[in-house]
Amino acid sequence: MSAAGMTVETPDVLVVGAGPAGLAAADAARNAGARVVLLDAAGDAGGQYWRHLPAERPAANERILHHGWDRFTALRGQEILTDAQVWLAERHDDRPPTLHVLVGPADGRDRVPRTFAPKALVLATGAYERTLPFPGWDLPGVFTAGAAQALAKSERVAVGRRVLVAGAGPFLLPVASSLIRTGAEVVGVLEANGWPRLGRGWSRRPTELLATRHKTGELAGYVRDLARHRIPYRAATAVVAAHGAGQVSSVTVARLDPRWAPIPGTSRDISVDAVCVSHGFVPRVELAVSAGCGLDAYGAVVTDHDGRTTVPGVYAAGEITGIGGADLALAEGVVAGLAAAGATASDAQRRSLSENQRFAARLEAAHGIRPGWVGWLGDDTTVCRCEEVTAGDLRAGAAATGSRGLRSLRLSTRAGLGVCQGRVCGRTVEELLHRHTGGLLDPGRTEQRPLAAFVRLGELAAAEEQEHS
Amino acid sequence: METQYDPVRPGETSPITIIVDGTPVRGLNGQTVAGVLMGAGRLAWRTTRNGRPRGVFCGIGVCHDCLVAVNGLSDVRACQRRAADGDSISTEAQA
């Protein structure tokens, strides 16, 4: 690189993602004496968990929408490079990858390129929601539960007046609470799993819950909110269709069997103007994949007890290592941040990690997706929202080509090839094709994206020119 | 939500106006383009190639359903872009 070219910055530790895991990792690494750069693609720190009103509207009573707000206010004081989008990880054999970053307004044209070649890299890129398709899920007024949460927390906008919250997992409860506090009427919370499975998942070995009792208290608070507002919580029930002309006006809900297949004769319609759906989370691993990190069977980044990935000098913490919530993310962040800075976590810090990991295992046992959900798909149900590929198109594509290759079937059906690059439908497309083909030969490829983020060709050319000038 | 009834008690902020397909829409400084549109009661603003309406779906920049053009630059995620007073938003001809 010439002297006139772009400077490559070489911090001891570069942390990507300023949610709970990244904030904790950067803080721990700084306290261990490392020179740290912490960056985030968003305009503010906190990640999705601690999303909040922007600096232009600082709220007096922000904490009522949050748990662990004091921990956040303590962590957010550190230096954070915001509006910084990593778009490429350039891999090396013997050291962490070089990260190429654009800094400026989201999807802008004249963002400032910066390049980091850190001694150690901590990836804390979090997760996004998995929302299973159903007829009408592409109608305006159908949101992920996370969208409802984001609009409530950082905009103070409720996604509707009469809102149903549905899907699987404890995340449905804080979403209902935020909606109530944003002025919406929540007409119900539907959990796909039945009480027997929920009971087995949550009450086995109750002593383990003592260690994560703050989390139990958090859930109890949400349950009190439901009771106070007389909001029904129904187990073994799901939204199986949304209806409306141009936007949602009603949904069909049905009872589910333990495999999540709708039980015939149990469906009824409910009038709503919005529905918020979440069936769990997908680790946001594209950077980790570009960096060469190994993934486990669930698509999460494999780490050892210090947060080391399979790539030398690259660490991972938080939801990208497996979905477990903010407490686990904070604990993992501390341990990975210390290790990345060349320090060692104490036994107590490691213990807090393993307690939280047991919570994550319970979460999967009680709320993980079951295969019967395909029973609510019709042939004309959209699966890939970007390219508008239906469940019938996938079935026909598999039958017509006889292919068992995910890559070739995606190319022939166009499923997952749209602007979101399969982030929304990828796992669903893989699962459906797996059934139709009798087993895919190359599952998991949806996660492989050469560019970690959407980037304009003009910006690439400008960055290139700067590098070679 | 109306600030005077909001239990979160947001601080004072200045109003902004953005121009959406030629029509002024009022919002608050600090909101995203999607926040301004939804705050004004708009649920959908993009049309797919099959003619289906779309607006916000994921709300965190993943799904790209909410794309708009901002000041002539297309393919900007409305849920990620902070709105600036006077921004000109076009909802036509998005990917």
Image: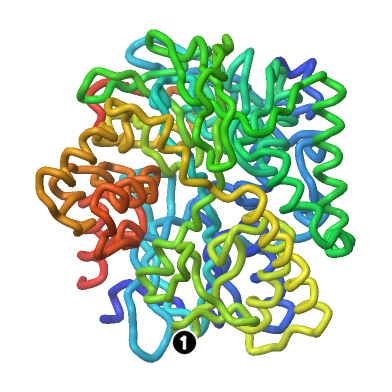
Kindly tell me whether residue A64 is visible in this rendering: yes
Task: Name, please, the residue furthest toward the front.
Answer: A264
Residue at the disc numbered 1: A312
Kind of element beneath mark 1: loop
Whole-percent x and y of residue A299?
A: 45, 63
Label 1 sits on what residue type?
A: Pro
Q: Please name whichever residue, A61 or A411, is drawn nearer the observer in this view of the structure.
A: A411
In this rendering, position of residue A335 left or right of residue A148: right
Chain of the residue under label 1: A
Q: Residue at x 24, y 18 (%)?
A: B51
Q: Residue at x 38, y 74 (%)?
A: A291
The reply, left or right, for residue A87 in relation to residue A16 is left
Residue at 40% x, 39% y: name it.
Answer: B63
The x and y percentages for residue A370 are 52, 46
Query: In this picture, is B85 found above or below A285?
Result: above
Instruction: Give above or below for A436 relative to A348.
Output: above
**Residue A2's x, y, as percent?**
26, 81
Which residue appears farthest toward the left when viewing the image? Answer: A401
Work out whether A326 lies above or below A160: below
Q: Residue at x 12, y 52 (%)?
A: A402
Characterize the local packing of mark 1: few (<14), some (14-19) or many (20 or more) Cα atoms within 10 angstroms.
Answer: some
**Quarter occupied by the C terminus of chain B:** top left
Q: Quadrant of residue A75?
A: bottom right
Using the image as rendered, state which of residue A331 and residue A30 is in the foreground.
A331
Give above or below for A33 relative to A195.
Answer: below
